[in-house]
Amino acid sequence: MKISSKRFREKYIIKISIISLILCLIPVINNSVSAENEKLSLKEAIDIALKNNNTYAISLEKVNESRIKVVETWGMLWPSLSTGVSYTRQDADAGYSSSVKSISSVTFVNGELYVNPGVFYNSLQSSRKGHVIAENEVRKVKLDTTIQTIRLYYSLLLAGESIKLREESAKALEENLRVVTIGYNKGTFSKLDFLRAKVAFSNEKTLLITAKNNYLSAKASLNIHLGRDINMPANLVGLSNIEISKDDLALLEIQEEKENEMLNRMTSESLKNRPELIQLKSTKEVQEYAAKAHESVYLWPTLFVKGSYGTTKNTYKEQEAAAAPPAGTLDAGDYYILSQLQRSGASSSPEGWNKSWNITVGATYKWGALAPVDSSHAKGKQARSQAKQTDLQLEDFIKNVRLDVQYNYLKYKSASNSIQSQQGNVETAEESLKVSITQFRSGIINNTELLDANVQLTTAKTLYIQALHDFQVAKAELNRAIGRDYFKIK
């Protein structure tokens, strides 16, 4: 009885443990299922990409570094402060030093400041422009990351929609093959019809396999870009859920004159907002300020302030009484004075610790730097040469700005035209396939014409999905060309 009771308790404990484990796993399973079912929006994808992008993190850190560089330049106006302690032991045969045995010194504060006004001002302006360059590098990396995320996001959507399209087409062709096979066996359809239906279905199955492979590649590319596991499911908002508003297609109705005005306005904004352009301008200014800083070495004097505050103590030797001079060399009065001075020894100097301070203000001019062989001349000329090179790069970039804006605008307009035309084209192709199926069943058209109708519908849907993809990517690329979010990314 005891053994059976013991086994009963063990089984009971095991059952309770299993039930508890299941109850604990239910929330985890629910969370994982909900996470898989939760759709990833484009905005969320961009946020994840920026969060996990090391290049973006580095650019943010460089902003912090450039900010510290500005503080470092201001540090040129901060004096060098120190405290010192010294002890000197000495000996001399004659003079005042002969009576001093040692000197103890404590300097509480010792400060000095050397500033070349030209070097300081130009170095400060250079560091500030460096900060501007770093800030626009963040903008540039953010824009690049955003546009790459949009490309990969919509490429995956396009691949997913292609699978659906191929599955629908394969299903229709499979049904067509079934019908033709039955008719061929009954003698209703010719062998040519049967072979064509079979080839069409086989080709569609191959296209479906290719579409699935393309989807896996697109998913892996997006996951890697987002910093996620390569096999992580990607449940995105479908292209069918993305609405194309009238405002998105409003550019199609703009007249040519207004279109040119809008392009000019976009170009002007691009010249103000493009981070690359701002970086080039700032780089040129940094190089010019660097040249001025090197030239300031011989154009400006260096101002300085020095001072100290401390205390000193002298220790004197014990003085022996003066020997009597030879007869006739000194009279009694002179001998008395000499002996008194020797006896007083260090009494003419203060005893103990004595506080003292001093301050010096002045300027030095490095006239030797006026020589052409001085390194400051070569450094200044190098910086001037670099500024000229940057100026040439700036000219080339400005020339390409309008071309870049116009090129991306035309891509956007072309995608808009495709969407507008393909929207009606898909509806027409669907209606055409319905009519073809009815006529095929009635014997009005043959199987080849039915297959053609199916191909036309597949082509129309493919072009429409591609147009949606190109439209969203074109908007992002045009935003990047302008340098700001001119169009909202959905």
Image: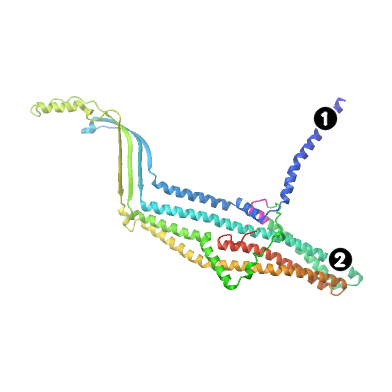
- Asked whether 1 or 490 is in front, the reply is 490
Marks 2,1: beta carbons within 8 A: no
Residue 474: image quadrant is: bottom right
Residue at 75%, 68% (x, y): give it. Answer: 427
Q: Amino acid at mark 2?
A: Arg
Q: Mark 1 highlights which residue?
A: 9
**Residue 227 belongs to magenta span:** yes
Image point (10%, 26%), residue name: 332
Residue 131 x %, y %? 48, 53
Q: Residue furthest right?
A: 186
Compared to residue 361, the image places residue 91 above or below, namely above
330 is higher (above) or lower (below) than 221: above
Q: Nearer the viewer, residue 286 or 261?
A: 261
Q: Mark 1: few, some, or many residues within 10 Å (few <14, many ≥20)?
A: few
Query: How far, Cα to Cα, is label 2 from label 1?
Result: 63 Å
Identify which amino acid the numbered label 1 is placed on.
Arg
Tell me: 465 left or right of 312: right
Residue segment shown in magenta: 220-229
Q: Is residue 127 visible?
A: yes
* Residue 415, image quadrant: bottom right
As drawn, is 225 to the left or to the right of 373? right
Query: Is residue 196 at least partly visible in the picture?
Result: no
- Side of 388 relative to 411 (left or right): left
Quadrant where the N terminus lies? Answer: top right
Q: Quadrant of the C terminus?
A: bottom right
Q: Quadrant of residue 358?
A: top left
The answer to which of marks 2 and 1 sits earlier in the sequence is: 1
Residue at (11% x, 28% y) in the render: 334
Tell which of 120 and 170 is nearer to you: 120
For label 2, the residue is: 178
